[in-house]
Image (cartoon, helix red, strand yellow):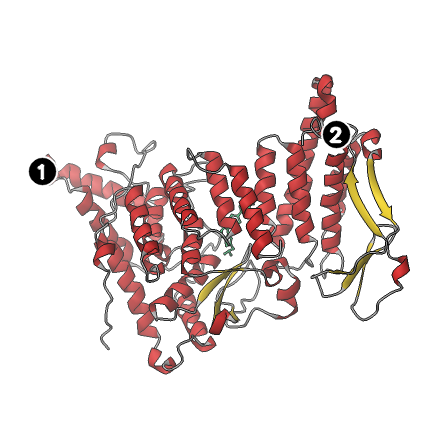
Amino acid sequence: HSIKMAGFRDDQKCTFPLQSIQDVVKLFRIELERGDEPNLALLSIVVGSVENLLTCNRYLSPRNETESEQNVKPNFPILELSTVEALYCKFESQIKGCVDVTQYRGNSYASRELVKKTSDIIWSSLTRSYCKDRAHLQTLYSYLTASDLQHDCSWLLKLERVATQKAGSKKDLLSERERGSWRYPILMATQGNKLDCFGVAFAVVAACQILGYSDVHLALSEDHAWVIFGKDGEETAEVTWHGKGNEDKRGQPVCGPTAQKSWLYLNGHPVKCNRHTEVAALVSGINPSISATADSKELATLQQKLLWLLYDQGDLKNYPMAIGNLGDLEEINPTPGRSSPIDLFHQAIFAAQTHYANHHVYPYTYLGGFFYRNGQYKDALEAWANAADVIRKYNYGREDEEIYKEFLEIANDLIPHLVKVVSNQAIEAPEKAESNCLHDPQCFAHLLRFYDGLCAWEEESSTPVLHIGWARPLVATISKFPAKTRSHVDIKISEEKEEKVDDEKNGSVNRRHSHGRRDSLQKNDVKNEEDIVKTKVNGSTNVSDKKAGK
Ligand SMILES: CC1(C)CN=C(N2CCN(c3ncnc4sc(CC(F)F)cc34)CC2)S1
């Protein structure tokens, strides 16, 4: 049956061909500022095309012809409207060809069947087997074009070079524009649909937008993505897989015991996107890495400018990770007149505290990582202790590996390194010993709070967290703090009766006994209040706060 192709509007077309970072930013500005919804499929194809050219296809522009292939420095590809339209129409016809919306006519909200059907279309068209955590698999460009040929791309470039050299005279040199467009049909010819976990979820939302369902939106945790739909976005559905070796739960709602306690689902505090936040997720997902050691500067600059555009529109206000990504980019390449990385990381923390009941870990690890890289070790320990105060709210489950690895690296790699550096400082510059971290009880208090959070995370969990591999670095770290420092940390055992603390972990009321051990009680078996005491850990410094590096 004939499918009506919705071409692009004039204000979208007028920005093509895209030949610079500014052109792409202008297209995004038009999409974001217009009254109607930004077109997720269009923007994903554009970003994916540019990313592919700047990282996989090591774009050669005529000016670089003479330079040897190795140190080619791309400036910016030329992205033709025809290429983007062709890929968009391919996606649109595939989706509209497979979903008979007349079957769902009537209710203006999407149904679970429709969401599952859309997910099945994307899912069943993915290449059989491929490396799922490879880079550059997050956009519709990757889904709609062959990535297999990318490896042969050098063959393609050599073929072109031979062809143009054969042509001899200048006039036969194909213009970059023609060569560029000629190059695409081959990439489109073979199937090669690849997407990563996030890419599948994004593709489902983009497909539902094309089908006219404005209620289907992306829900994002710190390591997973699913969709919300229906009246007030009350319905949830898994649409993609998570991790390795986990059976996918596509079509099922996100609920039940696993979703309530595990970090993977953020205990009911995921980022619930609107169309603008979905554009922010697409931009956050831009991956400038060319190789393990090299990044495309152009692509990083594009990502940074697009994030500032979204920031200025207020679209990052409830998206802590996107603000964190911007902070990382600003650390590498500061934009004059803009917020500092530390300000941005604090804005991400504020967003998590304001919108998500402080249930997100990454805002604190963004900040901790920044302090660590910049040698501000006391602040790093405090940020990591705050991160541990978040994870203590959860039970550790088998799909929480990513955050487990994050804390493992902090505890067994970053903190031991930090402690080695400061103990060398104490030896090399004894006169500065007073401001040294190892002589600051507050640093030791942060360390204890960090480990206490990990212990609390483990309690009542189905899977243990800590093991002997954690103990060795812990002992080494603690023993670097002199007894004098440790003695100044007063662990207050106050006899006052503790307020009931409703720990969101499992609805139980948590109380602390005099030994600081946490013993969670179920709601119904309330113990005798008198033996409940409160323990507080904080460092009282033997130097003024100022000198303690506050
Ligand atoms: C402090 C860190 C270790 C540095 N980067 C971190 N990131 C955390 C993950 N990142 C993200 N940045 C924006 N949005 C999202 S949504 C998502 C889950 C996925 F399944 F959809 C991940 C993620 C970006 C990078 S955490």
Q: Please tell me how crowded label 1 is: few (under 14), some (14-19), or many (20+) other residues with Cα within 10 Å.
A: few
- Image quadrant occupied by the C terminus: top right
* Front residue of 372 and 473: 372
- Image quadrant occupied by the N terminus: bottom left
Residue 69 image offset from top left, x and y in percent: 30, 34
**Amino acid type, callout 2:** Leu
Dot placed on the residue nearer the N-terminal end, 2 or 1 = 1
* Front residue of 57 and 438: 438
* Front residue of 424 and 278: 278
Query: Residue placed at 87% from the left, 61% from the top?
Result: 529
| Side of 280 relative to 462 (left or right) | left
Q: CA distance from mark 2 to mark 1?
A: 71 Å
Query: Residue placed at 66% from the left, 43% from the top?
Result: 384
Residue 307 image offset from top left, x and y in percent: 42, 46
Residue 321 image offset from top left, x and y in percent: 52, 49
Residue 71 visible (yes or no): yes
Q: Indicate if the residue with disc 1 has its beta carbon within 8 Å of ligand 1.
A: no
Q: Secondary structure at mark 1?
A: helix
Compared with 262, 421 (above or below) is: above
**Amino acid type, callout 1:** Lys
Q: Which mark is residue 171?
A: 1
Circle 2 residue: 438
Q: How many discs mark residues in the rendered view?
A: 2
Query: Residue placed at 31% from the left, 57% from the top?
Result: 34
**Viewer-nearest of discs 2 and 1:** 2
Q: Secondary structure at mark 2?
A: helix
Q: Quadrant of residue 279?
A: bottom left
